Structure formats: structure tokens, C-alpha cells
Amino acid sequence: MKVKTRTGNSNKKQGQVKAGRKSATRVKHSKFSPSWVVVHSKDAPEFNLELIGRIREGVKKSDWKQLIQYTNSTEKEFEHILPTSISSMQKKAVYGKETSERIYALARLFGLGYEVFDSKEDFKRWLMTPSKTLGNKIPFELLDSSFGFEMVENEIIRIQYNVYS
């Protein structure tokens, strides 16, 4: 598994990305949607107030589905992380504040992970592998709390800067 370490010269990511591995179609991410935050993880800090507003308005179901597709994941994978059940989410067009906040936290974390690791697959493999520095816990399993998110994010940043504990 290769990891991208931080250098002074970074490339800007574009607002359009390929959807899926083999697909030649491009997906246009609406500005400030969760999938936009994944693609623009370096840009997102400038827009924190906008993101807070989006969280308060609630994430649209279509934006959640786009995030799931972009991360090559399934809703079932995130079931233990989200504060509401997947069946409840399927009934709503717009999610509540708590669920929306968790979705944006996931988007920011995946954006950071995609920046640090060479591929989506490498990042997902890391998320599912026990980490010594996280007490031999699987990072993905820690994402059901804000403290867990912080621990996982800090570990990714340590990897980014080659600071191993």
C-alpha cells in the first residue's frame, strides 16, 4: 500500500470526477454537497460557515446517494456510523441535523483519506485493517462517535506527514 506524503506542491482536484472505476461518464458534484467536500477536501475549510448552513438545512437523499456511489460503498456499510437507521433514511427526502453532520464528517474524512492514500481502495483497506496506534481497533469501527472520528483523522494526518507512533 502506497501513501502520498505531503509536499509543498499539491495539485488541485477538479469539480468533476469519474463515477465508478470503469465508467467513462462524469458526475457533476453540486457545490458544497457531501461528495463535493470529498473532492475538494482542501477547499472545504474556507467554506465551513457554508457547510454549517448546509448541515442545518439537511443533506438531501440524492446527495447522500451520490456520496455513497462516489466512495464505492453501500449504505449498509455506514449503518453503524449514522445516528439513524438506513430504513428511516430511505423514507426521508432530507435528513436531520445530526445525520447531516455525520454525513459531512464522513465526506471530510474520505476526502482526507483520498488525499493521503494512493487510491480509494488503499484508503478503504486501511480503514478496515486493525491499527496498532488505535489500540488494534479497526479505524472504520471507531467512526460511530466524534472522538473516534478525531482519532482516525489524527492517524491519517500522522500518516500524511510520516509521523508514526
Image: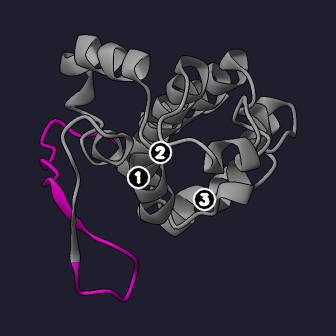
> Relative to 53, is 82 above or below?
below
Q: Quadrant of the N terminus?
A: bottom right
**Gap in angstroms between the C-alphas marked 3 and 1:** 23 Å
Q: Quadrant of the C terminus?
A: top right
> Relative to 11, is 26 above or below?
below
| Residue occupying the far top of the picture | 49
**Gap in angstroms between the C-alphas marked 3 and 2:** 9 Å
Q: Where residue 137 sits in the image (x, y, percent)?
A: 85, 39
**Gap in angstroms between the C-alphas marked 2 and 1:** 18 Å
Q: Is residue 134 magenta?
A: no
Residue 34 visible in the displayed image: yes
In what element is the residue under mark 3?
A: helix
Magenta stretch bounds: 3-25
Identify the mark at residue 33; answer none if there is no mark.
Answer: none
**Mark nearer the viewer, 3 or 1:** 1
Q: Which residue is mark 1?
A: 62
Q: Where residue 120 sits in the image (x, y, percent)?
A: 47, 63
Front-lying residue, 118 or 90: 90
In what element is the residue under mark 1?
A: helix
**For the residue marked with disc 3, what is the amino acid?**
Lys
**For the residue marked with disc 1, what is the amino acid?**
Ser
Mark 2 and mark 3 in contact (Cβ < 8 Å)? Answer: no
Mark with earlier residue (3, 2): 2
Mark with earlier residue (2, 1): 1
Query: In the image, what residue occupies the spot 66% across and 17% down?
Result: 146
Rendering colour mode: one colour
**For the residue marked with disc 2, what is the amino acid?**
Phe
Q: Which residue is mark 3?
A: 124
Q: Which residue is mark 2?
A: 110
